[in-house]
Amino acid sequence: MPYITECAVDACSYNVGNACHALAITVGDPPHAQCDTYFVTSFKGGDPTTTGQVGACKMTDCRHNVKLECQARGIAVGPAQEAADCLTYSPR
Ligand code: SF4
Ligand code: SF4
């Protein structure tokens, strides 16, 4: 699974120091390539010893998407159209 090389969404509960610590995120739904795992609560969660990876992606029109899985070498996440979007999204 591709790693999340950087996530600029500081407000997300899985984000510590611009890194995602969810074990696996889901990206989508179309038409926006947002991080579906983005979640805000009063404490930080996830596993601080690991870097998050992309577990599933619903953006079938992305050139990195093969059978609903991301095949990019890594992805970056940050605010764009939504609060937390896959910045590596590249429509075919
Ligand atoms: S990639 Fe998604 S789940 Fe991970 S820190 Fe960023 S917004 Fe949160
Ligand atoms: S790069 Fe494309 S396939 Fe990979 S998570 Fe982002 S939108 Fe999905």
Image: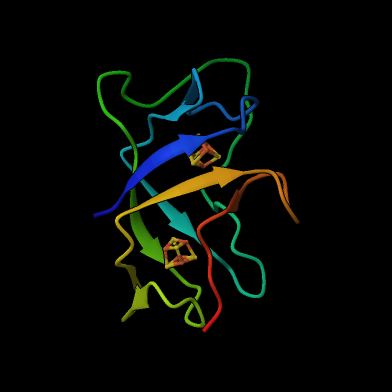
Q: Residue at x 66, y 75 (%)?
A: 31
Q: Is residue 39 left or right of residue 16?
A: right
- Of residue 16 and residue 73, the one placed in the foreground of this image is 73
| Rendered location of residue 22, percent (x, y) | 38, 35
Question: Which quadrant of the structure image shows residue 78?
Answer: top right
| Rendered location of residue 89, percent (x, y) | 53, 65
Q: Quadrant of ligand 2?
A: bottom left
Q: Residue at x 63, y 46 (%)?
A: 84
- Of residue 43 and residue 85, the one placed in the foreground of this image is 85
Q: Residue at x 31, y 32 (%)?
A: 51
**Label tally:** 0
Q: Residue furthest right?
A: 81
Question: Which quadrant of the structure image shows residue 67?
Answer: bottom left
Q: Is residue 82 left or right of residue 30?
A: right
Residue 36's place in the image compared with 28, above or below, is above
| Rendered location of residue 77, percent (x, y) | 54, 45
| Rendered location of residue 88, percent (x, y) | 50, 58
Q: Residue at x 59, y 30 (%)?
A: 12
Q: How is the image coloured?
A: rainbow
Residue 26's place in the image compared with 59, above or below, is above
Looking at the rendering, in which quadrant would you find the N terminus?
bottom left
